[in-house]
Amino acid sequence: MKHFFQSLLLMLFIICSSDTSLSQWVQTNGPYGGDVRTFAMSGMNLFAGTHYGGVFLSTNNGTSWTSVNSGLTISNVNALAVFGMYLFAGTYYGGIFLSTNNGINWTAVNISLPSNTNVPALAVLGTNLFAGTNRGVLLSTNGGINWTQVNAGLMDTTIQTLAVLGTNLFAGTNGGVFLSTNNGTSWAVVDTGLTNRNVNTLTVSGTNLFAGIAGGGVFLSTNNGTSWIAVNTGLTNYAVYALAVSGTNLFAGTLGGVYLSTNDGTNWTKVSTGLTNTVVNALAISGMNLFAGTAGGGVFRSTDNGENWSAINTGLASTIVNTFAVSSAIGGTGGTNLFAGTNGSGVFLSTNNGASWSAIDSGLTTAYINALTVSGTNIFAGTYGGGAFLSTNNGVSWTAIDSGLTPPYIDAFAVSGTNIFAGTSGGAFFSANDGTSWSVINTGLTNTTVNALVVSPATGGAGDTSLFAGTNSGVFLSINNGTSWTAVDSGLTKFDVRALAVSGTNLFAGEAGPGAFLSTNNGTKWNTVNSGLTTNFSAYVNALEVFDKNLFAGTSSGVYLSSNNGTNWTAVDSGLTNTDVLSFAVSPATGGTNLFAGTYGSGVWRRPLSEMVTEVEYNQTKIPNRFTLEQNYPNPFNPSTVISYQLSVVSNVKLTVYDMLGREIAVLVDSKQNAGTHQTLWNASGVTSGVYFYRLCTGLFTETKKLVLLR
């Protein structure tokens, strides 16, 4: 007995030392990429500031990244600057933050800083730190502890960029370029020759000053901004967001990729091979490495002056995840494939519940994915601006399927038998041949901006289906595969419908603003079901997901659960640091172990359903060929766990939990049940931590397994 308890204590120690993060939402390891706005170098450390993902650090030239956000309460980072041993981050309407340990910890340094300050630019000149803000230029002479406005003569105080040339400080604004020769005490306009004064970026090369203009290309000044000339020959995209200098090479990041000039901008050559996302927000140079930060595609690296690029995003989990799809693994192995469609990074696949992700974008001509769906072994991707794509090999390769699909903006898919429906910015479309050809089906659809589609069994008529479309002006119903539509919006208040879901005979709609609605009669009448969805932002329902009798709502302020058809909602957000939820998936598709949430800027998050749901009734239609008792999941758990078992014949089932002394703790099931797969939830609230046993008895089969409750 002594050895038994020693072994038990050792087992509990190992369990306590393992990952207990499944007691809440945890961020999965991807997908990779995101909206990268700025870079900073400090020795061997490369920092990337992202929108919605905060700051990431790489110590190996971008090969891998680590989130460094502790204390950084604003995740939208516009600017980074290194000042000695200090690292500063300028944020989007959240002021300035300081780290003295390479981003491991951050502290707000906003004393004397106006509230709601947007900081697009930071610059260091001698011992002075400057911040370019929406209220002009701010100066700190003590490492960010205190700030003073230095705006005399600055006729436009919307600062977008700062640059230092010798002892001169330049500010690029919405209204041109300004120069200060006295640390911001006074400013003078210096924009003669600038035909477009919306200055996005400034950079210095020797005595040359370059300005990147929104829609105006690149301008050069050789006399401290006194006069400017356009240097755009070969620059076919004039929306310039970033500039960087390496020796005699000048790089421009634009809306259409990266350009190189070797003669101070006199001529430009496009250098974007391999740059799958061509909206370049930021550029940085470290030795032979050139880095490009993109709008959605994360970071790319070139080691040959931009001739070739490779994505380097491992660990950079700052993606916007618009959509999911779930399918069984190829070969009938019982595994599950989870697909994530992102906003600017393409499609990713995980076969291990998000532990790792792989980019699967061969053949995709755009990285902006709005919709994914599965039909048999086919996977469909709907994109923003690129139309629809089909993969028949789990995303290894994709083929465009656009014949008849005239608007290339796809927001939703639905599958009914062999029929595929697509919701677009130009209405609804139908394909009966796996997307080979499409037909428009808009008769009666008075609003053709289709945000959501769902199929449900029709009331009356075996085998009939109802097709619902959520649009910018309410819900429409078709009972003839889209041949004609009827508005069904009585009771809807705002009509901007973003999500639809079906649970039995209940139809749910998520709107932008008023929240969630329920119809029990195929949309004829809707009722508001918002108790618990009380704030303005939480009522913006972006996604709905049904699991058994449980309904989840993904909103602009987190995840909510209702177990009574929306009558009441409860927030289930523990651990979810990014609460702007856009999409949901349940995986595995059969059984439902985890709920996945796609967020606006922090990738995919995962949480076991057993921690949130209060009632599970799952009965597979396929009859098992033997009795089985599965290991509970999660294990260890706190306070709830799911126990699954299979019955090969109708049986009198008793499922009981015992303690280590054999005392009965709980009877979870004691009834006659049909053959099939069953699940039950044990909520061990009020039970002390320890090792317990659960036993399944059917008369023909008995088995006992061990579980561990850890608090």
Image: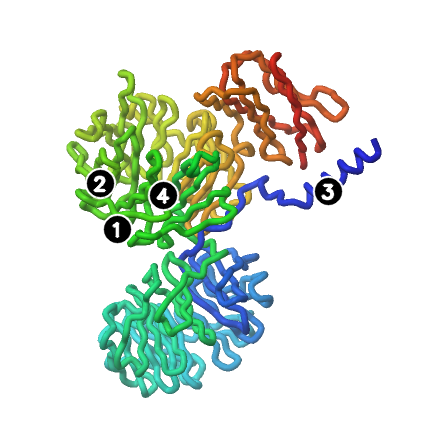
C-beta proximity under 8 Å, tags 1 and 3: no
Residue 515 in the image: state x and y as whole percent: 37, 36
Q: Earlier in the sequence, mark 4 or mark 2?
A: 4
Residue 77 in the image: state x and y as whole percent: 45, 61
**Vertical order, 648 against 68 (above or below):** above
> Could you tell me which residue is drawn at 35 percent across and 71 percent down?
307
Q: Give how far apart the Cα atoms at labels 2 and 1 are.
A: 16 Å
Q: Mark 2 points at which residue?
A: 436
**SS at mark 3?**
helix
For badge 3, the amino acid type reads Phe
Question: Badge 2, how many Cα within 10 Å: few under 14, some, many 20+?
Answer: few
C-beta proximity under 8 Å, tags 1 and 4: no
Q: Mark 4 points at which residue?
A: 393
Q: In which quarter of the image is residue 504?
A: top left
Name the side, left or right, on which 399 lies relative to 302: left
> Could you tell me which residue is drawn at 50 percent across and 42 percent down?
353
The foreground one among 576 and 113 is 576
Q: Mark 1 points at which residue?
A: 386
Q: Name the residue under label 3.
A: 13
**SS at mark 2?**
loop
Q: Which of marks 1 and 3 is nearer the N terminus?
A: 3
Name the side, left or right, on which 263 lies relative to 561: left
Question: Badge 3, how many Cα within 10 Å: few under 14, some, many 20+?
Answer: few
> Could you tell me which residue is drawn at 49 percent across and 19 percent down?
676
Q: Split into 4 quadrants, where in the image is the N terminus?
A: top right
Q: Which of marks 2 and 1 is nearer the N terminus?
A: 1
**Vertical order, 14 against 648 (above or below):** below
> Could you tell me which residue is drawn at 19 percent across and 40 percent down?
437
Depth check, mark 2 against mark 3: the one in front is 2
Q: Earlier in the sequence, mark 2 or mark 3?
A: 3
Q: In which quarter of the image is residue 441?
A: top left
Q: Give how far apart the Cα atoms at labels 1 and 4 are.
A: 20 Å
